[in-house]
Image (tube, rainbow, N blue to C red):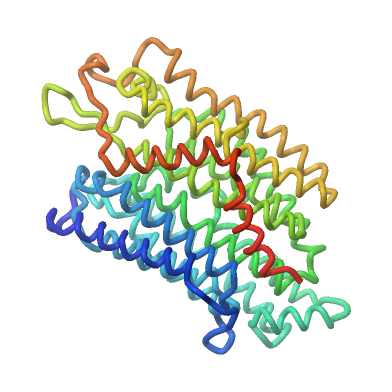
Amino acid sequence: MGEKGSPILISPMVWLSSQSLFLAAVLSFHGKFQEKSLLYGSLYFDSLAVNGKGSLFLVTALCLIASRAYLNRQGIFAFEYPLLILLSTFAMGLLISSYDLLALYLALELQSLGLYVLATFQRGSAYSTEAGLKYFVVGAFSSGLLLFGISLIYGSTGTTSFEDLSRILLDAGELSTGIQGGLIFLSAGLLFKIAAVPFHMWIPDVYEGSPTSSTLFFAAIPKLAIIGSLVRLYYFAFYPMIFLWQGLLIFVSASSMILAALAALYQRKIKRFLAYSSIGHVGYLLIGLSSGSLEGLESMILYLLIYMLMTLNLWTVLLTTARWKEGSHERSPMKYMDELQVLGKLNPALAVTVGVAIFSMAGIPPMAGFCAKMYVFFSAMESSLYGLAIVGVLTTVVAAYYYLRWLKIMYFEKEVKGFQKSPYTYEILVDREKALLLSTTSFFMLFFFANPSPLLVMAHEMALSLSL
């Protein structure tokens, strides 16, 4: 399980990386900027890029802080770990600003290189090696689809610039098969990266086999960058082809919500359960994206920001461990769902935190998750996507059942499974950083309903920067 390296280095590297990311987030949110392009139009800086990067840096810093104690307990002392996260985060920042298909492809590949290594960081674990190998194979396949789509578009138009593509498509009469096929392959390659149905096959195994700290990063961060690039593609470069990509997104969104709602019902391992939960949330995100309107884009951005905080909260709980009071042996208290009973008995405050996150993910009022789903459903109805909104509401009802099962296990199950002794001979380890992080995110999920203005204003500014 352990990794070679100095245990003296890992904590300072994590803190230094976190502080660098916090500083970058502050500069992104409060720095003055002008909308402009760089590198001959390959990158573009606007409200979407600046606020998206600020959110990206902030949540990544929180992920690193939440993972520090876990890395020490698991013996992952390699200082390269936070550096790989910084490399991937840098690539995601470039991805959000990408204004050219080649820049998008290069940024996506740079991001993926770091993620492949993070999945396999526990070299002594066969599960981690398997997760990294599956991630690499599927990632290479999706990159091939993406590159093939780019080549078709370039062959048909002679350009890879988003701005030039927008002008060509606006002036074009009948669109060629090459452009339509290129957009389909391009979309498939990006939807692979966010594990939308039917491109979801890899995510349960990768989530389960990777180190929990890496899985937290996979679950919370990359979706922001990839969906940001999808927004630029669909709402700027390929908006004249809305008849094609809107139908594709409606199908993928409905399929993701339905499959996640049904598959999560039968999961017993927490990581696999959260993998299918992630697929379902991708479906809800794509409702806003498929609406093709400014309101839909606002609702999707708001949902994405709230989803990142909910994910950060719940996965941070999974980074805690239980320690036998009579010895130094430590273990994860939550590998299988039945073991959630330990939380209700040993750490009631942590159990309440899980309950708040679960209520929010299920979309139960007055939690932040309810507001997020309400906005995307309203945006779908405003765009006359009534069938998609109905599917979303019905799958939310099903999701409420399997989310609320967590509370049933924590508070109403009597027999505690999976522990060698009585659960009261163990103690739950929650360090100071995790406690502060969990309390802050729980407070946000509880009181966002009372004061949603800051995120609503941010989402509106980001969406307005792409309005035509």
Q: Is residue 423 above or below residue 172?
A: above
Q: Point out residue 445 in the picture as x, y percentages from the top left corner.
A: 52, 39
User: Of residues 274 and 186, which is closer to you in this image?
Assistant: 274
Q: Is residue 449 above or below residue 146?
A: above
Q: Point out residue 317 in the picture as x, y percentages from the top left corner.
A: 37, 36
Q: Place residue 372 in its image quadrant.
A: top right
Q: Residue at x 55, y 36 (%)?
A: 361
User: Of residues 188 and 35, which is closer to you in this image?
Assistant: 35
Q: Residue at x 36, y 54 (%)?
A: 119
Tell which residue pokes out farthest to the right in this image: 173
Q: Place residue 228 in its image quadrant.
A: bottom right
Q: Point out residue 10 in the picture as x, y percentages from the top left corner.
A: 19, 56
Q: Is residue 344 above or below residue 458?
A: above
Q: Is residue 204 above or below residue 52?
A: above
Instruction: Judge left or right: residue 426 versus residue 96.
Output: left
Q: Point out residue 163 in the picture as x, y percentages from the top left corner.
A: 69, 81
The number of callouts visible is: 0
Q: In this rendering, does residue 145 appear at all?
A: no
Q: In this rendering, does residue 119 appear at all?
A: yes
